[in-house]
Amino acid sequence: MPQLEQPLMSQLAGEGQKYWRAVTLSVATPWYLFVYDVAYEDAVVEQTMLVEWEEVLAQLLASVPPQRRKGICRMEYAGKPRRWTQTWVSALWAVGESGDGVPRELIFKFEGDPVLRDANLQAVAPSASGELLFSVASQSHTRESGGDASSA
């Protein structure tokens, strides 16, 4: 629906980017809100991107400098009664080989959950070989440094 497109100044909208007043989501899959900072003139402003696939989320994280990454929230239409739920991501690792177009497995640490989980929310064992893609302090959603999936 073109009438839902939000016009923005060219300085705020990157080339090829569009902003919408409303979106329709498939409820069959989890969605992620990725909050990050962008430079605008003499200021830094937060932007929020809605992302469907974990592989795309990993690519976006690679394209945003770590100090600009503010938060990731997983949204899912689930439960009884069915409703949208949200869970903040405390840390995110990529585990396994990348190359030849084979995606790496993402391992999540969610706020309030001591267990590491894969994208299907199945419990996984800690791994010393994971690459830390994202980490926040659970109270303030500010960037922490370093670590691997075995130190969660």
Image (cartoon, helix red, strand yellow):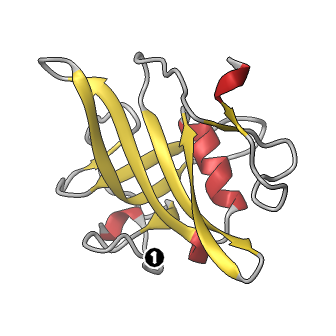
Q: Is residue 150 left or right of residue 81?
A: right
Q: Give the residue displayed 29% in from the left and 66% down from the top.
A: 152
Depth check, front residue: 124 or 58: 58
* Quadrant hosting residue 67: bottom right
Residues 152 and 12: in front is: 12
In the image, residue 140 lies at what x, y percent?
31, 74
Is residue 104 something one can see in this rendering?
no
Q: Amino acid at mark 1?
A: Arg
Name which residue lies at 54% across and 32% down: 52
Which residue lies at the image location 18% right of the left edge and 53% below the top edge? 113
Q: Nearer the viewer, residue 2 or 129?
A: 2
Camera-nearest residue between 109 and 50: 50
**Where does residue 9 sit, x and y in percent of width and height?**
79, 55
Which residue has dot 1 on it? 143
Residue sitting at x 63%, y 38%: 103
Is 145 situated left or right of 125 in this image? right
Position of residue 55 relative to residue 149, above or below, is above
